[in-house]
Image (spheres, coloured by chain):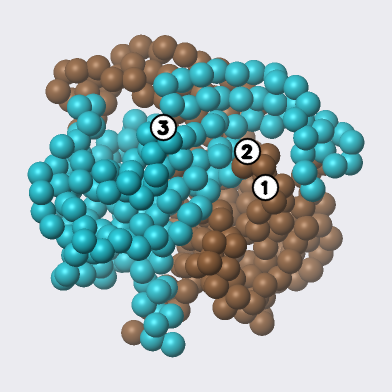
Chain colours: A cyan, B brown
């Protein structure tokens, strides 16, 4: 089913994204145009307090012109290990360190037009330090009880895919252990 | 928290993506660079048979150079209503029409660098017609029992975010009705 690179039609390089338009050859010998953005990869952290609250960050997202509730997340820097990146982002954005970490999964955010890969972690045993976000990030964090977060996800108040995956994973996981 | 458009630094136009790099002004008066891809929006369909199987499509995804298991999905065409688009994509990719439709939710795939919005539908009461994919799409469909699909999502065999959301939603939803 593989599609083979034939030639490049367009390339534009940003600070962290690369936009590409390639001509490819399909398995049936025909050609097609594929366009995409290359992304360095990212981490997201489902941080759960001992009272079963989820730590959210509230952040203006310029591409969608909206303030969104999301779990803490960030891009991988260079060849950084995703686990190290997750620890760094959680502390930068919320001031929390976590004593217990578990990898929940790895997924592609939108494989039809990007190679962005997202590493999702569960963080528990939270210890409050001091937040120190990037200078151009304006972020507030907020703890929301799990049941309320699940309701927010199912009612459209939480609109971010990785955040929905984190919350639903916890909800589905709870079910699995009950079965 | 709003960030205001200041000036455009880069623009590249593909067939369906637009890559943009903008300078913005932050609420604190400083400037920052934001880069993103504009996307027409998309639909995804969680189609469930009467035997609790999920309909998957298997498709080579050039941006990640992998064959992925995903639920049927596709881009919005023009000003098409998402529900019409969902009906069209399900039939094009799998040959199924559905008698019962329910909107599960709407979310941003990756709001940090794209405005792609995804409309997710649950489709039941499936009736088999004939598949007729786009000429440059090579797609096979496969029915997988729900419990197996949930296991595949939790074990990393399903790697696509929208597909994970669909499966986990069903898993979490089942739990909610049990509570």
Residue B12's x, y, as percent?
55, 17
Disc 2 or disc 3, which is closer to the eye? 3
Label 2 sits on a secondary structure element that is helix
Task: Tell me the tag on residue B66.
Answer: 1
Label 3, secondary structure: give it.
Answer: loop
Chain label for disc 3: A
Q: Chain of mark 2?
A: B
In-front residue for pair A123/B47:
A123
| Closest to the observer, A17 or B119 | A17
When asked about the image quadrant of residue B90, the answer is bottom right
x, y percent for residue B100? 61, 70
Write the residue at 73% across / 66% down.
B142
Q: Are marks 2 and 3 in contact (CB under 8 Å)?
A: no
The residue that label 2 is drawn on is B63
Point out the residue furthest to the right here.
A29
| Separation of marks 1 and 2 at Cα, in angstroms | 8 Å
User: Going 63% across and 57% down the picture, which residue do you hit?
Assistant: B70
Crowding around mark 2 (Cα neighbors within 10 Å: few <14, some 14 to 19, many 20+) is some
Number of the front mark, 3 or 1: 3
The answer to whether one can see residue A82 in this image is yes
**Residue at the spot of label 3:** A78
Q: CA distance from mark 3 to mark 1?
A: 23 Å
Q: Position of residue A22 (x, y in %)?
A: 70, 26
Disc 2 to disc 3, C-alpha distance: 20 Å
Secondary structure type for disc 1: strand
Mark 3 neighbour density, 10 Å: few (under 14) some (14–19) many (20 or more) = few
Looking at the picture, tell me which residue is in the foreground, B160 or B26. B160
């Amino acid at each position: 089913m593989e599609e083979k690179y034939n030639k490049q039609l367009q390339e534009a390089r940003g600070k962290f994204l690369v936009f590409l338009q390639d001509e490819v050859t399909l398995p049936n010998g025909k050609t097609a145009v594929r366009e995409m953005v290359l992304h360095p990869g990212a981490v997201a952290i489902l941080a759960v307090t001992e009272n079963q609250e989820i730590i959210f960050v509230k952040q203006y997202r310029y591409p969608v012109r909206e303030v969104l509730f999301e779990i803490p997340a960030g891009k991988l820097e260079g060849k950084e290990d995703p686990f190290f990146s997750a620890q760094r982002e959680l502390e930068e954005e919320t001031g929390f360190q976590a004593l217990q970490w578990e990898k929940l999964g790895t997924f592609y955010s939108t494989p039809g037009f990007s190679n962005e890969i997202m590493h999702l972690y569960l963080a528990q045993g939270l210890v409050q330090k001091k937040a120190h976000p990037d200078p151009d990030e304006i972020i507030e964090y907020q703890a929301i009880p799990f049941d309320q977060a699940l309701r927010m996800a199912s009612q459209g108040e939480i609109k971010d895919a990785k955040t929905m995956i984190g919350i639903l994973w916890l909800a589905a996981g709870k079910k699995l252990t009950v079965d």
